[in-house]
Amino acid sequence: MSTITRCPECGARFKASQAQLEAYHGMVRCGHCHAAFNAIENRHSNEPSPQLDLPIVPEDLSSLPTVIQADMRGAVMSAGEIDRDYEIYFETPPARAAKPQIWLWGVGSLLLAVLLLTQAAYLFRVELAARLPGLKPTLVAVCGKLHCNVPLPSNADLISIESSDLETDPAQAGIITLSITLRNHAPYVQGYPNIELTLTDTNDAPVGRRVFHPPEYLKEAEDEKIGLAGNRENTIRLAIDASGIKAAGYRLFLFY
């Protein structure tokens, strides 16, 4: 005689003989979801179901030590008494025990992400300050505590000389006046570059060279730290003493 039992976890129904139920005090394992349950207490008398043909998954226990199996009444059986046609209930650690580890992994991942973002902000602080001006005061304040600074961007490819002119001063012998119009092609503020002036003779050979740093060529009202605004120009005029130098031409070079 067989009876129909229903898995309380997934609802699958199975056939089990009376002898099998009595042999294991009713304890079996569902072949569908692998949940252990008492087949006697979960007898089902409804109409047959296609799931009745599903097997209760066997398990090879030959490599395991003697395993204690307990039914709902506390009866005990050894592994040697197990019928291989059914999976028997084994006590295993509850799944909830792994949750604290998952929580720790989550916190660790969050801390790692914060560290990576901090490093990225430090490495790209110049670009961030240029493209997000509202963020610059915070970056400057943080850098002050870390003993670093937030300089202005200095992309020489986006700074150019739009026009230049070198002429002698008729009122002062040996004095030449250099006029340069610098343009910042970047959409953001950039630092002022260094300007190298090379005087050449009639054969284009250098006869004199001088590097002018921003504090030397900017007007008194202009602050080097403010920089040259994006898509803006600034005209510079420099009086240079070239006494004793016979210059026929000149070359200009911008660099940071």
Image (cartoon, rainbow, N blue to C red):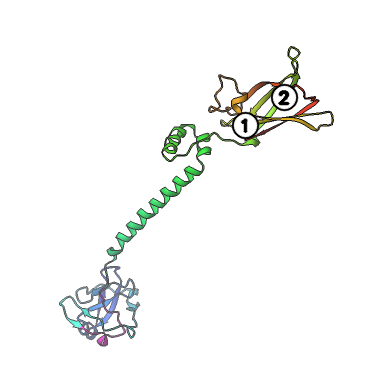
Q: Which residues are magenta?
A: 77-91
Q: Amino acid at mark 1?
A: Pro
Quadrant location of residue 224? top right
Q: Residues within 10 Å of mark 1 (few under 14, many from 20)?
A: many
Disc on the earlier residue, 2 or 1: 2
Question: Quarter holding the C terminus?
Answer: top right
The residue positioned farthest toward the right in the image shown: 203
**Residue depicted at x 64% and y 34%:** 158
The residue positioned farthest toward the left in the image shown: 73
Q: Main secondary structure of the magenta part?
A: loop
Position above or below: 118 against 256? below
Question: Quarter holding the N terminus?
Answer: bottom left
In the image, is 159 to the left or to the right of 148? right
Depth check, front residue: 188 or 60: 188
Depth check, front residue: 212 or 47: 212
Image spot of residue 135 (x, y percent): 45, 34
Q: Which residue is mark 1?
A: 193
Q: Amino acid at mark 2?
A: Ser
Q: Which residue is mark 2?
A: 164
Q: Which mark is residue 114?
A: none
Residue 124 belongs to the span the image colors magenta: no
Residue 88 belongs to the span the image colors magenta: yes
Question: How many discs appear?
Answer: 2
